[in-house]
Amino acid sequence: MSSFSRRSMDVSVHAADASAAATEPALPEWNLADLYAGMDAPAFAADMEKAAAECEAFAADYRGKLDAMLRAPDASQRLFDVLKRYEALDDLLGRIGSYAGLVYFGDTSDPRRAKFHGDAQEKLTAATTHLLFFALELNRIDDSILDAAAGQKPLSHYKPWIDDLRRDKPYQLEDRVEQLFHEKYVSGAGAWNRLFDETIAALRFKIGDEELPLARTLNLMQDADGARRKAAAEAVGVTLKANLRTFALIANTLAKDKEISDRWRGFKDIADSRHLANRVEREVVDAMVAAVRAAYPRLSHRYYKLKAKWFGREELDYWDRSAPLPDTPTQTIRWDEARDTVLSAYGAFSPDMAKIAKRFFDENWIDAAMRPCKSPGAFAHPTSPSVHPYVLVNYQGKPRDVMTLAHELGHGVHQVLAGHNGALMAPTPLTLAETASVFGEMLTFRKLLKAAAPDQRRAMLASKVEDMLNTVVRQIAFYSFERKLHAARRESELTADQIGELWMSVQGESFGPAIKLGPGYETFWAYIPHFIHSPFYVYAYAFGDCLVNSLYGVYEKAADGFVEKYFAMLSAGGTKHHSELLAPFGLDARDPAFWQIGLSMIEGMIVELEGMTA
């Protein structure tokens, strides 16, 4: 089943503004009827029953028979037919799971939705237990036999999927152990994930006479009023601290759960399982992390020193890190303006790209309205190739909200273009999954910057630099924090204070001396969903941003055929390694110099900002 990919950049989650809502039509909410008409829809119940029966039938038909099948003269055709059936079943399971998840994330406080989602997850886990044998049994087949069949038509169609499957072979366990891991997910890691989601959604942060949900509270840390920013930051610290034992227990439990799984499977490094899932080599990630950390002084330290100067200070309090620049007029962008801006930017690059993105607006594939217990942040979810993706944002009307919309629509376009590969090969590794999203942001930013008046240019450049620092520097700091946390958890359980110390150590290193991290900030790790749902996911943002910066540099040189190559890259889905996809652009992520291209683009913007204040 497809996973939900969230964007989390500390204060880049947004809330709907009541004043904006009063001056324009209601923000759109998605129409999930393309999946199912409702939680009690007969079609949903029928598909759940069908999926369970199909999973059992698939196991009955093929368990223990794959080796003999692949030794038959028509092995290529026979395994192709089996994989077509397996793929159709995967698509159905994806449709069911996607619907249950999207309904739940629309209001995580609703007990009926929570039960619906939990029941669906339990039934899907029980059904898919019957499918575990398939990958395990295929991977026990002799390489020469499987390679021979996969090298012939029609099975060669699935060769990329088979090659990916073989990469997992060294880390797979005996069938019954795999079954145990699979079945216990619902009562183990899955349950802790759910506890985190429901706890976060239920929290309220007291600011004056108001009690606000997390998204709206974090949004106030971008408010023009410094007192409001401080009040919001302190409210986050107070409320998280009051719930820190719960968050520390969740983090400890999930880190231990991962350590057990990694040890049984034989992963050597803490993040190796994520690298394997991302189909990226450890040395490539290590080179990127080293390059970004080495660049802290000339990027984040340098920029925040400049920003403190704009505020007439030597250092900024942490709640001022994302503050709008002094004397910058507040700008509210209507939803229709945001839509037109993104579609226009996409259309200038490629009319086909804009045409795909427009369907998200026209056919209600976007949920943009802010509701009290709606999932915070933003994501694009591909569902299954037989349907279409959905996008969730929390739109307030700020320029950064427009960037978030452009980002998630980039994901959506990518998912649509990759869908033709089918349920097994459409999913893209995380290292490449951020390509279209960050590229879409860059297109939108460049369009807005080109049209900006001279007095708006500094604010726009500063905002973009901050977004890029959040995407690159901050996410690598998150990755460093996770590494420290998981390494320490292998030695013993961690107290909430110990986790806070680890958090503060990486934050201080990444921000530099111009950001003052005061009391309360040590709790801010507790609300980052990636640490809970997808350990070590965060480096994919930095990978994607640096990759796109390099890619955009190629585009700016107006190389012939760029758009065609770009669409080919997105359309490949998960069928090619990152080295194959970047080669047509003359780029290679394995080259240490590759990362300097993207980092230099950020540095160039900072230099331009310094020139404006000279």
Image (cartoon, grey):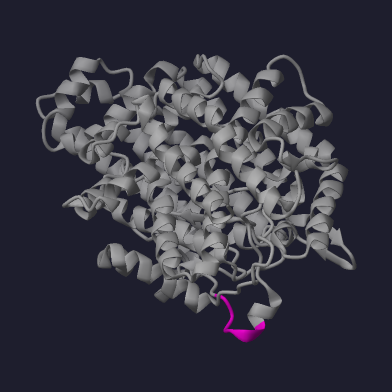
- Give the image location of residue 25, x and y in percent: 57, 84
- Give the image location of residue 32, x and y in percent: 49, 67
Q: Nearer the viewer, residue 527 or 550?
A: 550
Left or right, 582 with respect to 308, comes to left
Q: Residue at the spot x=57%, y=76% of the render?
A: 27
Residue 277 picture quarter: top left
Q: Nearer the viewer, residue 355 or 521?
A: 521
Residue 360 seen in this snapshot: no
- Give the image location of residue 163, x and y in percent: 28, 27
Q: Residue at the spot x=64%, y=26% of the render?
A: 257
Q: How many marks?
A: 0
Q: Main secondary structure of the magenta part?
A: loop
Rendered view: 56 above or below 261: below
Residue 527 seen in this snapshot: yes
Rendered view: 507 above or below 237: above
Magenta run includes residue 23: yes
Left or right, 545 with respect to 344, comes to right
- Quadrant of image for the N terminus: top left
- Give the image location of residue 297, x and y in percent: 59, 33
Rendered view: 112 above or below 79: below
Q: Nearer the viewer, residue 473 or 352?
A: 473
Left or right, 574 with respect to 284, comes to left
Magenta region: which residues?
22-27
Q: Residue at the spot x=58%, y=84% of the render?
A: 24
Residue 205 picture quarter: bottom right
Magenta run includes residue 96: no
Looking at this view, name the residue that lies furthest to the right: 209
Rendered view: 545 above or below 182: below
Q: Residue at the spot x=82%, y=55% of the render?
A: 230
